[in-house]
Image (tube, rainbow, N blue to C red):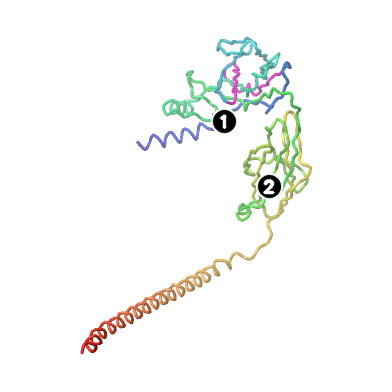
Amino acid sequence: MLFLPAAALCCLCSALVAMAAELSQDHLTLTRRVGQTVSFSCGGTQQCDLDYVFWYQKKDTETFTRILYIDSDGDIDKSYNHPQEDDFSAVNKGNVYELQIQTVKLSHSATYYCACWKYAPHIVLAVLDIQQQTGFCISLSHCADSGDYYDIFGSGTKLYVTDEQIVKPVVSVYPAASRAHLEGKSSLLCVASDMFPPLVRFSWKRQKDNGTEEDVTSAEGEQLELRESGRTTSILLIPQRENSTYKYRCSVHHEGFTVEAQTEQEVPAPAASCPPEREPADLPALQQADLSFQSQCQVKLLCLMYTVLIVKSLVYCCGLSLLMILRNKGPSTNCTHAD
C-alpha cells in the first residue's frame, strides 16, 4: 500500500516538468469604457498539439465558463451556451490568437483565459489517472477528460470596465531588515502604490561588477509578493556573495507600461566578522556559567523556603504552648476564689 503513494509522488515530480508549459498573455489588465472595443491576445500556441484555442471567462464570484474555441483555419465554435456568446468573436493571426469584444458592456468585467490541448506522455497520463481517482489537479491544468490530452492555460487578462483613468504606479525600492540577514541573505523591498488598475507584475534586474545587467531569476533570488489595499510589495531575498557587489533595480509592469524605480539598491559583500572559531570555544563556558548561576539560585530558593517553613512551625508551637498554659492556669484561679 505504501508503494502507491511513493509511485504517485515520483510520477508527479516527473510530470511537473512536462506540464509546466503555459500560454502567454502579455496584458495583465485592460481598462475600457462602456461602448469601446477590446481584444485579448494569446501567444505561445506553437506548443499546442491540437489546432484549437479555447477562451474562458472567469468572473470574481463565479467559476470558469467556456466562451468559444477557434481552430487554425479561423473557424469558430460557440456551442457552449454562454449567455454573452454573441458579444464575442475571435481571430487567428498565426501563432497569436485573439478574443475580441466589439462593444464593451459593464457585464463583461472579468478575467479572460486562453487554453489549448497538449499531448500527455505516458508518465503524465499516469499522474492524470491519479488525479481522476483522487480529484486533485495541478494548477490550472484540468484533469484529462479527452483521452491522451490535457489543457494548458495562459496567465489571464483582467478587463476593467470603468470611466476611471489609468494611473501609473509610484515605485520605490528599500532595503529591508529581517532575520534573513542573519542567515547570510539580504532582502530588498519594491513597493508599487497609488495605481489603477491595482494589478501589477514585478521584475528585478541586477548590475554586475563589469556594468552589464541581467534579470534576476528565481534560482538567484527568492521573490515574495504581498498585496494590500492601495499597494503591492515585492520582496527579493538574495544570498550575500563574497567579493561581489551588485546593484539591484525593480521594474513594475502595469497596463501596457513599464515603470522603473528611480533609485538602485546596492547589496555589498558581507563584512568581515569575528573569527567563528572562537564561538564554539566560548559558548560552552557561557552555558556552564549560566547553569551554575541557575543552580545557585535554586539552592538559595530552597533554603529560603525551608527557613520559612521552620519559622512557621516555631510560631505554631509557641502558639500552642501559650494556649496550653492559659488553659491550665484557668481552673486553679477559679478554685482559689471559691475557698
Q: Is residue 174 above or below residue 48?
A: below
**CA–CA distance in space, label 2 to label 1:** 28 Å
**Disc 1: CA contacts within 10 A as few (<14), some (14-19) or many (>=20):** few
The residue located at (56%, 23%) in the rendering is: 62
Q: In this view, does 312 lie above or below 267?
A: below
Q: Mark 2 points at which residue?
A: 188
Q: Does the magenta stretch include residue 232?
A: no
Question: Badges 2 and 1: C-beta atoms under 8 Å apart?
Answer: no
Q: Quadrant of the N terminus?
A: top left
Q: In which quarter of the image is the C terminus?
A: bottom left
Percent position of residue 37, x then y: 72, 16
Q: Mark 1 points at which residue?
A: 20
Quadrant in which residue 40 is drawn: top right
**Camera-side residue of 32 and 286:** 32
Percent position of residue 188, x then y: 68, 47
Percent position of residue 244, x then y: 71, 52
The residue located at (23%, 84%) in the rendering is: 331
**Disc 2: CA contacts within 10 A as few (<14), some (14-19) or many (>=20):** many
- Mark 2 or mark 1: whose residue is earlier in sequence: 1
Three-letter code, disc 1? Ala
Position of 239 with respect to 133 (left or right) is: right
